[in-house]
Each structure stands twice: as structure tokens, then as C-alpha cells.
Image: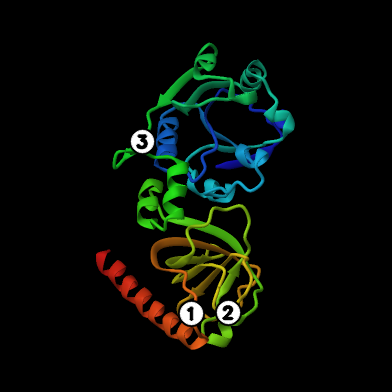
Amino acid sequence: MKIIQKNYQDIKFEEPIAIAIGNFDGFHLGHQQIIKALLTSTLKKVLMTFNPHPRQFYQADFKVLSTDNQKGELLSQLDYLCVINFDQEFAGLGVDEFISFLQNNHVNEIYVGKDFSFGKNALGTIKDLRAYFKVVIIDDVVVDDHKVSSTLIKQLLSEGQIGEANKLLGTHYQLSSIVIHGKKLGRTLGYPTANLALDNQFLPMDGVYLVRVQIDDHQQYYGLCSIGTNPTVTGDCDKKVEVYILDFNEDIYGMRLDVEFIKLLRHQIKFNSLTELVNQLKNDEINVKDNIAKLKFEK
């Protein structure tokens, strides 16, 4: 699959294409149904999405469930991932201008969810598209009587319901980020952690999680991930994401970690002393290893 990221004026497809268009935040089961339908087309297949997420363009603190890098990894069966730079000019395209943009790129088929809208102020509808293109509408995916949506997944993550969120995603929720230097307090406690740079990815509820970690697309490890303010050892309110990787002791500063969330082990706790904290960390490690053994047995 070829990845294209450009301003909309610079995107030039010269042959008939079929597209799925949307934000695809999290690439959950509903999004996957749209892509499965797109893959049935006999034309060149294109996922057309946006960077930044349109909500983030208008709301700087908006958090996303997946990065464009993660989307690229998930969509390798397509011919193109087309990421349009979402700027003021693109946001201002009216319905007719947006349709002209699609026509100029030889769009023949469009695959979308039934609540799809487009153009300035989201005034464009599926009915508008059907006047010019073959439009395939994909029904909502329902799991446990709930429509699968990015909003619902965020709610579940914010409540620590990792298993339920993963069910709607069809995979483990994942954070991808670069390892940065921290205060190195974990080393003094016997639990060195990799501190992750925080950007606009959505964070699950504060707590300690069983995770699976991949380092720069290489070997996988299990570990503990702590999300929170470290109330026992720091007095600030800055949220941190730290990963303690089991059976690992290498310099990985500047490398990318892909952290898959498997299970919430416990909530964030403020301990009365560092000794209490270390004892809890030891119990957390035992808990993780017990859970890993169960996972391997279930396989």
C-alpha cells in the first residue's frame, strides 16, 4: 500500500478509484466493515482520511484513538492510504466544491457509514453524493446492543474497561510513542521504566495495566504500564505514561514503543511510603506474570 499525505489540491489520481472516506479514529469494527466492503471493488482501492482529525483542528485538546502510522499498518490490503492535510481551506469547501474534488480524482465508488456527512459545516449528505457516484452504505456494527463508535470506545477506556474496548476495536488498544528521559525514579526503586512522550493520543483511565510491548517493530515483551501522576513520588499534576518491561534492561531512549493494553490490574494509589510502593510493585509483577501464564495457557 502506498501512503500519500498532501494538501487536497495536490492529490491527483489519474484512473478510476473506489474510496472509503472518513476519520477512522481507532479503526474499530465498524470501520473495518467499511474497508471489507471497499475490498470487494474491482477498482483501485483508496482510504481517504484527514490529518489532523477535523475535531482536533477546531479543538486543540481533542484526543485520538490511533495515529496515522497505526492506520497505515492496519490497511495494508488497500492500494492507497490518502491522508489529506486538514486545513482552513479544505475545511471551507462547500458541497459542490467537495464533489468536484472527488470527480477530478476519478472517484467512481464511495463506501461510507450511514451517518456520513461532508463539506463546510458538514452540510453534504449521502443523497448529494448519489447524484454523481455509486455510493455503498455500510450498516452500523452492534456489539452487546451498543453501536460501535469511537466515542463509546473512549468512554470504556476512560472507565478502565479495557476488555470491552478491545472487543469493539477487534484488537488491543495501543499507544505508540517515543521513549524520552524521565526523572529515573524507577531505577532507584529497582523498577526502571520507559517514559513515553505524550501527544494527542487518548489515554485510558489512570492505573496500572498488563501490556504487551513492541520496540521499534522488533521483539515483543510483556510489562506493566502506569498511567497517572505518580502521587507517591511526585508533587506535580502532570500525567505520565511509564512502562516497566519484564526481563529487559537495554537503552531504548529515542526508540518507538507500541504498547498494547490487555488488562487493568489496579487503580492509581498514593502510598504512605516508598517501601509500600516497592512492595506493591513486587505484587504487581507477580500479578502480571500470573496473567501472562494464563494468556499462554489459553493459547
User: Which is closer to the viewer, label 3 or label 2?
Assistant: 2
Spatial distance from mark 3 to mark 2, Cα to Cα? 44 Å
Residue 46 circle label: none
Does 102 sit left or right of 165 as displayed? Answer: right
Q: Farthest left residue?
A: 298
Query: Which of the two labelled residues, at mark 3 and mark 2, occupies the earlier sequence position?
Result: 3
Residue type, mark 3 in image:
Val
Q: Where does label 1 land, which residue?
A: 271
Where residue 190 appears, as percent x and y from the top left, is 52, 86
Identify which residue, 251 or 113, lies in the foreground: 113
Q: Which disc is residue 233 wearing?
A: 2
- Amino acid type of the residue tagged 1 in the rendering: Phe
Sequence-first disc among 1 and 2: 2
Q: Residue at x 53, y 46 (%)?
A: 71
Secondary element type, mark 2 = loop
**73, above or below 30, in the image:** below
Residue drawn 67% across the image and 46% down it: 60
